[in-house]
Amino acid sequence: MAIVLFTDFGSRDLYLGQVKAVLARDAPGVAVIDLLNDAPAFNVSAAAHLLASLVPTFPQGSVFLSVVDPGVGGAREPVALRAQGYRFVGPDNGLLSVFAARAAFPEAYRIAWKPEGLSSSFHGRDLFAPVAARIEMDSVPQGWLVPLERLSVGFGAGDLAEIIYVDHYGNAMTGLRAEAVRRDAVLIANGSQIKHAPIFSAVPPGAVFWYPNSQGLIEIAVNQGNAAADLQLEIGEPVRWVD
Amino acid sequence: MAIVLFTDFGSRDLYLGQVKAVLARDAPGVAVIDLLNDAPAFNVSAAAHLLASLVPTFPQGSVFLSVVDPGVGGAREPVALRAQGYRFVGPDNGLLSVFAARAAFPEAYRIAWKPEGLSSSFHGRDLFAPVAARIEMDSVPQGWLVPLERLSVGFGAGDLAEIIYVDHYGNAMTGLRAEAVRRDAVLIANGSQIKHAPIFSAVPPGAVFWYPNSQGLIEIAVNQGNAAADLQLEIGEPVRWVD
Amino acid sequence: MAIVLFTDFGSRDLYLGQVKAVLARDAPGVAVIDLLNDAPAFNVSAAAHLLASLVPTFPQGSVFLSVVDPGVGGAREPVALRAQGYRFVGPDNGLLSVFAARAAFPEAYRIAWKPEGLSSSFHGRDLFAPVAARIEMDSVPQGWLVPLERLSVGFGAGDLAEIIYVDHYGNAMTGLRAEAVRRDAVLIANGSQIKHAPIFSAVPPGAVFWYPNSQGLIEIAVNQGNAAADLQLEIGEPVRWVD
């Protein structure tokens, strides 16, 4: 299996390499896959819905090192989660809660272990990476994980009727899962009315449409164009639909 | 050997990790090298010339997962190519055609296999990655690849007298191969006249020059400066030279 | 161990993949970790102080392929360094000198080997990568490394009272090590007076503070905000403090 990174540490920045050095030390030879390291930094609910949509594109058994953590160094606890055959570590701030709420029989744990020399600002390197490595290696020392009744922050199992991600092409993903919306529904975002099309090449260049994307989310796009720029869509923008 | 990624999926975005999960599943233990994931998204001929210049910097046997594919989900076919000891998968939209046209005895194949659950928008993950993995492992199932007479879109073997790439320093690469241009030629791009110098440190800081770059292409640069910004050069800008 | 990349080659650009192809060929199976590939391109002293702060976050034995090299193709020599159990290759332009000056008994070497077909502009791929691979494999051929009395450019062992890095959150790192500054000192940068706080969550959202970061450097930050934008801080901006 692999350790999968879903963080806001920045794909260009100097933090990921430090995390990977810990993973190479504690889980040598294990594949480490960068899923997203520019996750929405201050919008934990958007990140939680995005993560929940992406997990099923990975094989069961994968360990997600998941850190979007504006409260690092504060009171929130570090947690681990097992759900639907996947494993997770991350802050108990809601980030893991959407996937957990949609799963049957999720098991949550508080990470009770504290490393010597824990920095106040970089738990991804000092705390989450060593725990993720041991979970992947099936070698978590006794006492490191303490069962929890439930996660302390929960966003629920439902959809999020907002823009939750804008990709580098300008496609704007919503937190609406594709099965929730009928094909003849009209989506409304920032005052624009948007109709369904099956795929980019089904509409003329420059035309806006929505379609069920490859993660199973409703996505707003423009054929050979930038939907987020054209419609002025940002993460957090509400969306709704009319049948 | 390795699987080499040359795509427009975005180095910061959430698509590459999904592709790499498929490669880790289907070609476990094989090295995956990111060559370029911010290839020109809507300029397939520029991308084709750039790819052709980069392939020889990799060892023969490498498998290039090559996707710049604005027509995904439309009528273009997925293809594989063997040429000069290298292997490729990608869309049949011209992207592989420049390398193929310059090679002796290129062999092209249509990818006849269609995965269950093929998404309409992410063939890189669902179709090209599984095929690239099997080509690298020398385990392509019978019937997956059907010989083609030739690729259906071809940009030819010649040079492209345009800017085809701007790097993060602002150096502007042309589609002209170094052997095509005499050292005393003057290059003309967007109204500027540019003379040859052997290397950055041969001209004063801030001075513009052209030189044969480490990929064998004519490149326009400024010593300790940004040529693309200074001369307002973008991908697609025509260049010419006078001897 | 691993080969660690600290360069200005650009995390999104087409240079790193070419370097990694050489490393995969010459040190097959060795882990390659991207530490930072957007290091300050034209500020070698800032890059040198940043590198010195980051090395100890990696295990001893790591080999740092370190290239910030605006003078490539000119007169500067390529060098290797062994210090504190770490190994380095890079240009002899000061980049390795801060770590060397702080180490006991650093050993410097001139790289005497010149590859056939050395490009004038891409020594990272053609020269430094093959040497780094052989150092990691403990298989450096006789004659490749020639002992030097000392590096020819040295920035010294002291701190650098400047901004040396701005991360993607906008946190501004200084070249001041945390032990140099008392907790009640007031930092002054670009006219702003900045007080200490232990961590982000100890101040209100939007408030600026300084704290010792996870690399042991004094860093200027804003809780849930962008310090570099708010205070207009760039790499090279002087900082000072008053007790």
Image (cartoon, coloured by chain):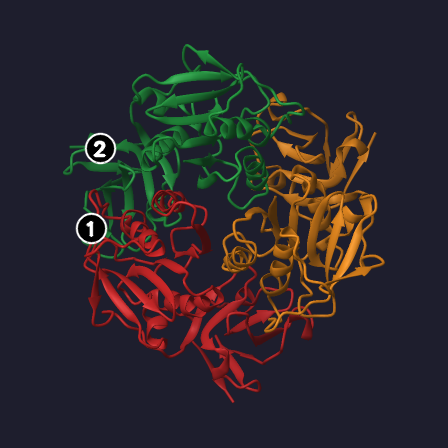
Chain colours: A red, B orange, C green
Residue B115 in sight from this viewpoint: yes
Q: In the image, which disc is placed on residue C241?
A: 2
Q: In the displayed structure, would residue C226 be above or below residue C77?
A: below
Q: In the displayed structure, would residue B55 be above or below residue B127?
A: above
Residue A207, how many percent across, how many down? Answer: 64, 72
> Dot 2 lies on which element?
strand
Looking at the rendered structure, the kind of residue marked 1 is Lys
Q: Quadrant of the C terminus of chain B?
A: top right
Q: In the displayed structure, would residue B121 be above or below residue C184?
A: below
Residue under the image location 61 percent in, 26 percent down: B200
Instruction: Answer with the quarter of the image where residue A220 lies.
Output: bottom right
Instruction: Answer with the quarter of the image where residue B181 lies.
Output: top right
Q: Label 1: chain? A: A
Residue C77, how many percent across, how many down? Answer: 52, 18
Q: In the image, which disc is placed on residue A114?
A: 1
Residue C71, how many percent across, how many down? Answer: 54, 24
Residue under the image location 60 percent in, 71 percent down: B119
Residue B65, how many percent across, how many down? Answer: 64, 53
Q: Nearer the viewer, residue A148 or C168?
A: A148
Q: Quadrant of the N terminus of chain B?
A: top right
Q: Residue furthest top?
A: C149
Residue B152 in sight from this viewpoint: no
Looking at the rendered structure, the kind of residue marked 2 is Trp
Instruction: Answer with the quarter of the image where residue A102 lies.
Output: bottom left
Residue under the image location 52 percent in, 81 percent down: A187
Q: In the displayed structure, would residue C239 be above or below residue B95?
A: above
